[in-house]
Image (tube, rainbow, N blue to C red):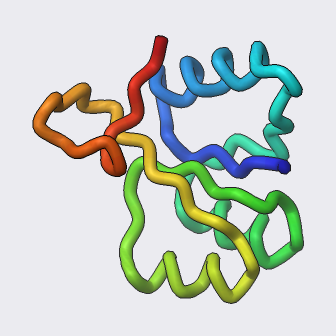
Amino acid sequence: MSLLLCLGGALEAEVARILSKSDPVVGIARRCADRAEVVTAAEAGVGSVAVLREWDLKLSKHLHRCRIVIVHVDGSGNPNLGPRRRCVTP
C-alpha cells in the first residue's frame, strides 16, 4: 500500500511519523501540497490510498476513477465525532 498524504503542517508530519513506525512500514508515495498535486499523482498511477483532511464529491469521484481509496483524517480532536469520522493518534 502506498499513500498520497495531503494533510498539511503538523498533522501531516505526525501521521508520517506514526506510519514510519508501523509494522510493516506503510509507504508514503508522495506528500502532496494541495488537491491538484493529489490529482496529478493519482492520474500518474502514484499511490493507492489518498489520506486527506478535506475533500468534496468532485475530488472523490475523480480519485475513485483513478482507483484511489480515500481515508479522511480529522485533526480537530473533536470528541463528538463518531469513530468513523475520528482519527485518534497515540
Residue 59 image point, x, y percent? 50, 77
In the rendered image, the residue lying farthest to the front is: 83
Viewer-proximal residue among 72 and 39: 72
Q: Kindly give the residue lying farthest to the left in the view shown.
A: 80
Q: Which image quadrant for residue 30?
A: top right
Relative height, residue 12 to residue 84 (above, below): above
Residue 34 vs residue 80, the one in the foreground: 80
Q: In the image, what residue occupies the spot 67% across and 25% down?
A: 16
Percent position (x, y) of residue 1? Answer: 84, 49
Asked if 11 appears above or below 41 in the picture, the reply is above
Is 70 located above or below residue 13 in the figure? below
Quadrant of residue 67 within the rendered picture: bottom right
The spot of residue 63 in percent (x, y) is 63, 77
Q: Is residue 46 left or right of residue 89?
A: right
Which residue is depicted at the point 83% across and 49% down? Answer: 2
Residue 88: quadrant of the picture: top left
